[in-house]
Image (tube, coloured by chain):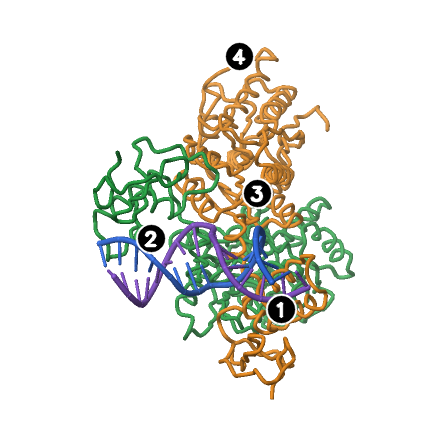
Chain colours: A orange, B green, C blue, D purple
Amino acid sequence: MQKCIKCGKVDGIIRAGFLRGQQRYHCKLCSHFFVLKSNQPQPTKSNNPITIVDVANFLGVSISTVSRALNNKSDINQKTKDAIIQAAIDLDYKPNFLAQSLNKGSTHTIGVIVPDVGHPFFASVLAGIQQVANNTGYRIIVCHSNESYRIEVLNTETLMACRVDGILISHSKETTEFDHIKKITEKGIPVVQYDRVNSELNTSNIIHQDFKGAFNLVEHLISQGCRRIGVMSGPKEMQICKTRIEGYKAALQKHGIEINNDYIVHSNISYGEGEQILNYFIGLENPPDGIFAIVNRNAIEMMKAAKEKGIKIPDELAFAGFGDDILAQYFEPPLTVYNHFPTRIGEIAIRMLIENINNKSNFNPYSKIVEGELIIRKSSLKKGSCL
Amino acid sequence: MQKCIKCGKVDGIIRAGFLRGQQRYHCKLCSHFFVLKSNQPQPTKSNNPITIVDVANFLGVSISTVSRALNNKSDINQKTKDAIIQAAIDLDYKPNFLAQSLNKGSTHTIGVIVPDVGHPFFASVLAGIQQVANNTGYRIIVCHSNESYRIEVLNTETLMACRVDGILISHSKETTEFDHIKKITEKGIPVVQYDRVNSELNTSNIIHQDFKGAFNLVEHLISQGCRRIGVMSGPKEMQICKTRIEGYKAALQKHGIEINNDYIVHSNISYGEGEQILNYFIGLENPPDGIFAIVNRNAIEMMKAAKEKGIKIPDELAFAGFGDDILAQYFEPPLTVYNHFPTRIGEIAIRMLIENINNKSNFNPYSKIVEGELIIRKSSLKKGSCL
DNA sequence: TTGAAAGCGCTAACAG
DNA sequence: CTGTTAGCGCTTTCAA
């Protein structure tokens, strides 16, 4: 007959049903239920995952003891702990993250909203975020707003429903209303805006040196002899566009060049728009001799179209764009850019967020600006100049 | 004095504490607790989110009634339902996804493991997945294995802990062991492998026409007069590399060209490796006159290096690569590729997974092959030929 | 048509 | 050192 694993007595033992196909016993004397630990760990073909209860019954201990052992608490007998940990391994127990989070009120998960994962800039930002998340033990849920305001709002709702500990967001091109973000911050959920930010919101944010970058690029074009500099910008309301245009204007002013609104074009900065804008520029009575694109990809598109028309780059028309990536490097001629180190943006953004999460009560949102770097390439380097 | 909102009587009413700063009442006669609905919805500055209990107390109904109303169940009075829905809106109640999932045993979430989000191919696959997920109401958790086997295993564990309903995976370059996937399928969690698959696993999978694509590309190079065709492949064990090399060999054989192992180079298909491989090729006694790269990015790198050495493309050395993207289109000369429609891969993969999720009991894993398309560009089109 | 109560899997406070 | 118990927020019987 079976011995009780608790009190060691044989007399009180009765069969008490089955646990996952294994005979379960009950000791009337010490009123303990238990299942004998079989030597060959059962195949666990059952669909419902092993829970802490299974582990507890398996060894005839209580669930709190199991919880303590598995969470490395101090007040537990080393032997019990070892046995439980071994049992957990044998049974292939995995904690249920949902239950843990529900109980703890914190998911250790960060929501990231990205307007466009296909864009190399955001892909790199994401890589930076992932990197830090891995090292700090945070989970990431990535939502893709696809440059749509409506989806962005849905994303925030999804993330709130998932009870993420904090949110990293870069707004869609369409976004001009920010109530969805206010709602989140009012609930005390930390938010960090990156790249495309709205500075009126009471959140931390991290941006590039949009002004300085634009200023430097345009000043560089001027230094190469350009006097009629066109700019392909994005949506009028987008803060980064505004700031970059300011940088553009400041550079012109500094060098005594008049600002001509014909040279300032707003677009949707979608892929494929570059050619059309180039056509507009070269159709002007006094076409530009230099073009600054607020998004590098559009600069490439314009260069491609210009090349096809036989326009000489950079001598007849020089190009510069915001943001570096492989296409800017590999295109012929390679594009002069202001590199804004996207991976670093991601890393810093998530660090700021985690700082905020760990210190919710007395945290004051702040802004950070990442230093960029002017990279001069052949798209703007005219004859007679040298690198 | 206050009237009971349930029985309408005044006599039994006593104060019964506070709910979120609002006076709460108890009617002794009908033993109901309730809070008066204030006209100005309170600011809810409190950090802990509104729960179903708050909504219930707010109206003096039970939580099950609230649950019914919010889940659009039939057995509920229309007026009660309307009132509850209004109250939920007023209080800005959002269901707790964790609690729902814990209760239901299903999260309506799909885990996606991606080796490298920075790669345009995977970015496009992801876009396809996202698209379908949005339309079908599934949530997505994206995990980035960063081409590391160790992280890939961690990812699977994270996703299991999150109790995702299914997993989409493309393996890291390092992955040659697949026990972590077996573990998942044994637990009855549907898995679909995409692109980099292991066909010995009992899961659905979706791949390109790797054989045919390689065959077509190489045959095209042969048609352009190439007779010594080098191939830059990836890790030896990777199934797609094996298959593509088979396609390469088959094309040579069909045209009576001897296979020369000097022309078959295995690499890590990391960015930046192209130049080194090119140097190897042109250092051979009998250097190739055509190169087929298993990853398009490497082909571009090799072309860049070749251009810098003054090698004429395609006349002295022609190039072709697997997979299309913007760089292949914009590089000078543009690269001949086999386009494998990554977005479609993503869409189909997630559809297969959802099909499996909805039909767990009698679902037989199957494989799908997405038709690709040969795109001939200048990198391989020799003089005398025309498009 | 509604409410009470059990339970999803887990943690933690409180008793022994 | 270990067990009992009360939740976390929700859905879902079962009763009324």
Q: Do marks 1 and 3 both belong to one polypeptide chain?
A: yes
Residue that appears at 65% across and 80% down: A8
Task: Look at the numbered disc 4 and give the secondary structure of its residue.
Answer: loop
Q: Which residue is mark 1?
A: A88
Question: Which subunit holds the residue at mark 3?
Answer: A
Residue type marked 4: Glu
Instruction: Give percent across and percent down for residue B100.
Output: 42, 55
**A376 sits to left or right of B387:** right
Instruction: Give percent across and percent down for residue A61.
Output: 60, 69
**A62 sits to left or right of B192:** right
Q: CA distance from mark 2 to mark 3?
A: 44 Å
Instruction: Give percent across and percent down for residue A124.
Output: 60, 43
- Other-residue count near label 2 (Cα within 10 Å), few / some / many at <14 / 14–19 / ≥20: some
Residue type marked 2: Ser
Residue type marked 1: Ala
Q: Which residue is mark 4?
A: A258
Residue that appears at 50% across and 51% down: B124
Q: CA distance from mark 1 to mark 2?
A: 36 Å
- The circle drawn on residue A120 is 3
User: Of the residues under marks 1 and 3, which one precedes in the sequence?
Assistant: 1
Q: Which residue is mark 2?
A: B67
Q: Do marks 4 and 1 both belong to one polypeptide chain?
A: yes
Task: Look at the numbered disc 2 and give the secondary structure of its residue.
Answer: helix
